[in-house]
Amino acid sequence: MTSTTPTREALGLPIFKEHHQVSPAEIAIGVIIGRTSEFFDFFVYAIASVLVFPQLFFPFVDALTGTLWSFAIFSLAFIARPFGSLVFMAIDRAYGRGTKLTIALFMLGGSTAAIAFLPSYADAGTTSIWLLALLRLGQGFALGGTWDGLASLLALNAPEDKRGWYAMIPQLGAPFGLIVASLLFAFMVTSLSAADFLDWGWRYPFFVAFAINVVALFARLRIVVTAEFEHLFRTRDLQPVSVSSTIRTEWRTIVIGAFAPLASFALFHMVTVFPLSWVYLFTRETPTSFLLIEVVAAAFGVVAVVASGRLADAFGRRRLLGACAVGIAVFSGFAPQLLDAGTVGEIVFMVVGFVLLGLAFGQSSGVVASGFATEHRYTGSAFTSDLSWLLGAGFAPLAALLLSVNFGLIASGAYLLSGALATLIALWLNTELAGRK
């Protein structure tokens, strides 16, 4: 396909030689910046879904029902994300990766910032709820276009004996994003009165999210549109193709890839969004105290993500993911009850949960990406990631809260257990298919 991007010669820029080598460290910087900005957006909305939205948009129902409605709207982004990938892949093919990223990140940042201007239910009635749902859909749709291929490029350029180490680098964005978002909300809650926080204080993190998105956009564009990286994307077959053709030819790999990380993705919300809602609704713990517990636990998660790289290189990624799935299954059988055991119980639940999450989530991306044919690797990896988040994480806070309220905290472990079993089955099927090939 003919590119619409001006040549470097036409722009008067230097021509890079084909043998110029881009180091994995350069790719890693772009990956971490991009992922941290995306997860910061994610956690700003998630925290507000518990602390703000039930009171602001659902004051006509009790706090629990309002939180459940808030979590239902929270799920909309995960439903919209695959549709965003479908549209943005077409933009990528027609106008290039840089154009796609620019549109997607401005749409993501714009949707996030617009939430800060929403009127409350008291001011606009049900219109405010519909606007919140619409902007949440916009966030999810835009996230479908933020796939830049850098994570795949990083994995493909990693040394053979350090693939696990480089695979964990993109996953660091999740705990980093949570730490920043939690600290920002903790600061706003402690610095303002309850009335001021609900009136305007909660809006500030959404403005910060937009600013971070703009910085991340330019940082990523500075990498992905350079001649060296364009050359790498071409030579590594990281080019967009039709989503429909990818699904037709690679549906088995997509299905297995979508289910393989479900243990970690289910745990993802069980140690971030759900416990905040439970503690806020049913204990005397202050939001600030629990947000700080999340920060400390997320720091343990960072260490665990880094450790996952070493362990994966030493023992193999599939073995590590399988062992983590078993650990998560065991964790699901007793850990949720710790949230009713006071501060010490909450700390134990969060720290152990984040250690398990870091070890599993650190290697969850691209566990079966190598199974894609080279021409489908870029598109297939993006679409598989969308489905994984939808199936594993999209409805986790809603399901866990509903189960816990109706059947006790131990019942929320059933959601975790189902994710662990799905991971073990997917890893087994992937091994079987690889053996047949």
Image (tube, rainbow, N blue to C red):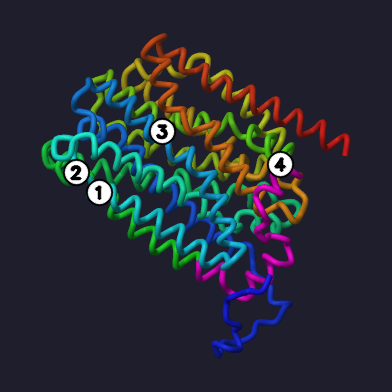
Relative to 168, 198 lies left or right: left
Going by the numbered disc 1, the residue's amino acid type is Ala
Residue 116: which numbered mark, if any? Answer: 1
Q: Mark 3: which secondary structure?
A: loop
Residue 42, image quadrant? top left
Of circles 4 and 3, the one toward us is 4
Label located before the other in sequence (2 or 3):
2
Question: Which residues make up the magenta segment?
Answer: 221-249
Q: Residue 298: within the magenta?
A: no
Q: Residue 238: within the magenta?
A: yes
Q: Mark 1: which secondary structure?
A: loop
Which residue is under mark 4? 368
Asked if labels 1 and 3 touch by Cβ distance under 8 angstroms, the answer is no
Going by the numbered disc 2, the residue's amino acid type is Pro
- The quarter of the rendered structure image containing the N terminus is bottom right
Q: Mark 4: which secondary structure?
A: loop
Going by the numbered disc 3, the residue's amino acid type is Thr
